[in-house]
Image: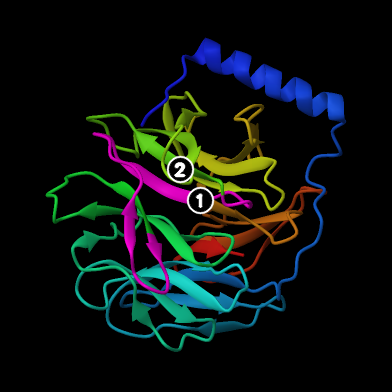
């Protein structure tokens, strides 16, 4: 299943791809067509007892969507913004849940035989562009697996398909806008993703896996841009956690935040002109938005609580 290119071969492949792109003419970076969205940002907040899911509108008004005695976290919008996929320990086991955009009709869509991840490590479940499926990482207890693999679940019928099966841990899948590929993170066998992890891209069925980053440290949480031309991720390649973007071919990684504080889990705005991410630049974890045209950054949740896992 794994097609792993030598760095030199990979560089040659990417050079060909870039030549084709350049011959067609490259429009200015980060200029995307607008998409329909109400601009609401999902995020996870520690409410003093556990982690719950909140939504914030463009004016900064915040509404709590989950309210129970367990951790609910890592919420992601469906393509039409009518539903939200998230992780929860509501039934004791960490599982993938879906609820309506207002927090109603909460239901588990994965079985209790799939452990859907640790708090802080497992990523935001990613919807396929048609809204029919959700990809996520989990441990399969039935097959007594000790590592995280990537699975895809059909939202309507609950059918599960495992699309990675390696000795490594696979994390943070994200569907490309056309649904044909999935970006994800993988650690090396015998290591921890917090120490060494890289970005890969594969076909949506798990085939044709290519490694995109080759760095010491952690490259994780990839997300395709709305037009499919770039991949956002956060990296600790320089000894600090910052937000990066690279081309859809794995070329030209660029540090967008370049600060001395921790910044993680960045997500694109629906129009692709801004990103939302969490940062500790003010001393605690808050949600920030950056305009990619101007570089201007503004805080969106200015409080003393722990705010994480934004999704736009």
- Position of residue 57 relative to residue 251, above or below, is below
Report which quarter residue 38 is drawn in.
bottom right
Give the residue number, with chain letter if any, for mark 2. 184
Residue 177 shown in magenta:
yes
Residue lying furthest bottom: 104
* Residue 52 place in picture, x, y as percent: 40, 76
Give the residue number, with chain letter if any, for mark 1. 174
* Residue 103 place in picture, x, y as percent: 47, 85
- Position of residue 191 relative to residue 159, above or below, is above
Q: Residue at x 67, y 45 (%)?
A: 228
* Residue 44 place in picture, x, y as percent: 45, 69
The kind of secondary structure element at disc 2 is strand
Magenta-colored span: 153-179
Q: Is residue 125 visible?
A: no
* Residue 91 place in picture, x, y as percent: 22, 77
Query: Where is the N terminus found, in terms of image quarters?
Result: top left
Is 292 situated left or right of 190 in this image? right
Is 211 situated left or right of 193 in this image? right
């Amino acid at each position: 299943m794994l097609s792993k290119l030598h760095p030199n071969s990979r560089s040659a492949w990417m050079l060909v791809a870039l030549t084709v792109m350049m011959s067609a003419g490259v429009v200015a970076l980060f200029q995307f067509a607008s998409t329909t969205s109400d601009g609401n940002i999902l995020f996870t907040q520690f409410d003093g007892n556990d982690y719950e899911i909140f939504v914030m509108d463009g004016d900064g008004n915040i509404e709590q969507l989950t309210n129970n005695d367990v951790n609910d976290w890592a919420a992601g919008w469906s393509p039409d913004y009518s539903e939200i996929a998230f992780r929860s320990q509501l039934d004791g086991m960490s599982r993938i849940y879906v609820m309506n955009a207002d927090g109603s009709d909460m239901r588990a869509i994965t079985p209790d035989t799939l452990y859907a991840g640790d708090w802080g490590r497992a990523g935001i479940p990613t919807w396929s562009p048609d809204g029919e499926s959700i990809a996520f990482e989990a441990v399969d207890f039935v097959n007594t697996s000790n590592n995280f693999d990537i699975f895809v679940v059909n939202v309507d019928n609950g059918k599960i398909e495992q699309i990675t099966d390696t000795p490594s841990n696979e994390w943070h899948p994200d569907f490309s806008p056309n649904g044909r590929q999935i970006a994800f993170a993988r650690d090396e066998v015998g290591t921890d993703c917090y120490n060494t992890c890289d970005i890969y891209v594969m076909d949506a069925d798990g085939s044709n896996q290519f490694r995109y980053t080759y760095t010491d440290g952690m490259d994780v949480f990839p997300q395709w841009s709305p037009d499919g031309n770039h991949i956002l991720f956060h990296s600790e390649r320089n000894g600090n956690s910052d937000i990066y973007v690279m081309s859809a071919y794995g070329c030209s990684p660029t540090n967008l935040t370049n600060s001395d504080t921790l910044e993680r889990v960045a997500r694109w705005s629906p129009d692709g002109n801004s990103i939302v991410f969490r940062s500790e630049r003010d001393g605690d974890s808050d949600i920030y938005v950056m305009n990619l045209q101007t570089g201007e950054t503004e805080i969106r949740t200015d409080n003393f609580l722990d705010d994480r896992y934004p999704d736009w």
